[in-house]
Amino acid sequence: MSTNKDEIEFFNKTRRIIFSTYHNEEKGGPDMAFTYLERYRPKLGPQSYAGLRAELYFYHNNRKDLKLTLAADVVDHTDFTGLMAGEQIRFDVTTNPDYKKLKDYEPLQKDVDAKYKIAIIDSSGNLDDLIDINFPFCPECEQGRLIDMAVLLPENTNDNGESRWNNDQCHIGVCNYCQYFEEYNRISTHYLYDIDTEIDNAKSALDEEEEQTVDFLSFKSKIILEHAGAVLPYLQRQFNKSIMTLCNREFVMTDKDGDGYNCLSVYWKKDLRILDDYILDEYEIEL
């Protein structure tokens, strides 16, 4: 029975054969590279086969646009290097991002400011998502990362308490460790409500029979998902950033006299396990 070391060596040897074949037309070029992949499939095993298949498809479909170069196996979580917007990027290719941990990339991100993106490949070999994990390190505590969040703020009013008929939306980076934050950008938009207003409006639209029978917990979850799906593309275009979390400003009452504090409450976050330790449910910061 082969050891883990044997499996790794066989994987790396097969990888070298497949990619060297890819660029050798005399040996069959790309078509033969894919043929070799299938021939080696039984010996690779399911996990290694899936990983090598994902790498080959990612390279085949994106090598020209991203100017990809095959990376050597030096255990730095880099399958390829390439260029995006004139910046050198290290690509880590996977079919299952649940196995990735942000801390594994941090040594090189800290040491040489290496830029990483995780390329998620679907079962058809297509690029499903390209995750930017280059969150700045916190300048305050130097332990956490400033995760990109969008905050939907309540309706703006003038000095007389009259509506301005718009709401502010902020792009911020918040440290998961000390809650230090930076506000990067702020815009004002007509009829893009905070989540509390959106839920209240949806409730108001229910007729009497629906209001009596609706499961409000499920109803609220449905409205949150619909609202997130509607506003995220707009905010990501406006802020030119991939948003990992949507937040709402809330007032938390601490006693019966009405004392309390404003905070940001997370109501949606990107479904990536790599972010689990980097996003809190609530941040005691005020915007």
Image (spheres, rainbow, N blue to C red):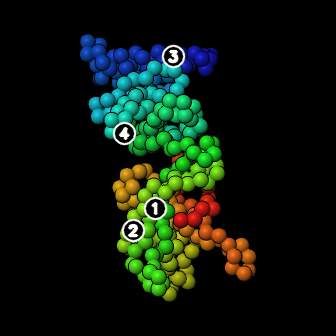
**Residue located at (63% from left, 45% from top):** 141
Give x and y (percent) for residue 114: 47, 32
Amino acid marked by disc 4:
Asn
Residue 188's disc number: 2
Helix, strand or loop at mark 4: loop
Residue 254 found in image quarter: bottom right
**Residue located at (38% from left, 19% from top):** 18
Helix, strand or loop at mark 1: strand
> Which of 19/285 is in front?
285
Q: How far apart are marks 1 and 3 (CA)?
A: 49 Å
Mark 3 lies on residue: 10
Q: How far apart are marks 3 and 2 (CA)?
A: 56 Å
Foreground: disc 1 or disc 3:
1
Mark 1 lies on residue: 170
Q: Distance between the residues labelled 4 and 2?
A: 36 Å
Give x and y (percent) for residue 207: 47, 85
Foreground: disc 1 or disc 4:
1
